[in-house]
Amino acid sequence: MKNVIITGSNGMIGNLILENCLSNPKINKITSIVRRKSGINHPKLIEIVHTNFEDFTEIESQFKNQDICFYCIGVYTGQVSTDEFAKITINFTRAFAQTLRKNNENTTFCFLSGQGADSSEKSKMMFAKDKGIAENILFNLNFKEMYSFRPGYIYPVTQREEPNLFYKITRILYKPFLSKIYPNIGVTSEKLANTMVDIGCIGNEKTIFENNDIRLYKNA
């Protein structure tokens, strides 16, 4: 039985991961670090409301004895300024991961990254460069196991408010056209979430999962 810590569980993928973990017999306890209450009550769930994602000192005790982490905090390109995007993508990730690593020797870290993440940190695209920096921070912390998931377009299985016009159009076109013409353009939200949980629980020889790896993964 595993103890799990999740952040980003109010978001699309984080919420699906939380639901999977709540019903998963391999998981004993779930600590969810959130900015606002989810309204979910479950015997397995400990929900911690915390607002400063650059400093977790006040709740550091909640990071102890964690077997698996699912880190799902993110923001869409264009939603915030360049500096804010870097703060959320890099600074938040660093602070959370360093606190977790400080308090655990044997944690598996599963990071929701994105297609095009550039581990060379040289890309001129903000998203690719910042995600690459975040990935490198995590790999250099030497968790017991570290997995980065790089989905392309994530097709929402459940209803949600789309962040912009591009996503509204893509959602309409994805199932009937785009997924058939360009099968590796994206992955469903459920497939991504289930794959992350499965790999977090049982491990895998790969450490970076590109969109096609996620889409073709057999056990989720």
Image (cartoon, grey):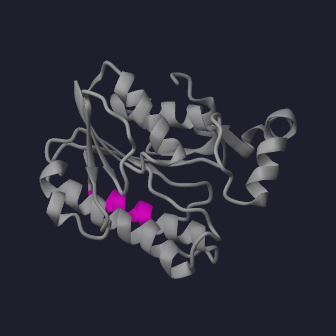
- Would residue 99 appear left or right of 37 to someone viewing this image? left
Where residue 35 sits in the image (x, y, percent)? Answer: 36, 57
Where residue 197 sits in the image (x, y, percent)? Answer: 42, 33
- Quarter assignment of residue 56: bottom left
Residue 10: within the magenta?
Answer: no
Residue 182 visible in image:
no
Disc tally is 0
Q: Quadrant of the N terminus?
A: top left
**Nearest the camera: 30 or 181?**
30
Q: Residue furthest front?
A: 39
What residue do we see at 37% from left, 54% from top? 36
What residue do we see at 24% from left, 62% from top? 98
What residue do we see at 50% from left, 59% from top? 74
Looking at the image, is 29 positioned above or below residue 7?
above
Residue 135: within the magenta?
Answer: yes
- Would residue 168 appear left or right of 49 to someone viewing this image? right
- Would residue 103 appear left or right of 147 to someone viewing this image? left
- Would residue 209 appear left or right of 58 to someone viewing this image? right
Looking at the image, is 75 positioned above or below residue 194?
below
**Nearest the camera: 183 or 77?**
77
Looking at the image, is 108 positioned above or below residue 51?
above
What residue do we see at 19% from left, 50% from top? 63
Q: Which residues are magenta?
A: 134-141
**Nearest the camera: 74 or 138?**
74
Q: Main secondary structure of the magenta part?
A: helix
Where residue 166 sits in the image (x, y, percent)? Answer: 78, 58
Looking at the image, is 7 positioned above or below residue 121?
above
Residue 181 visible in image:
yes
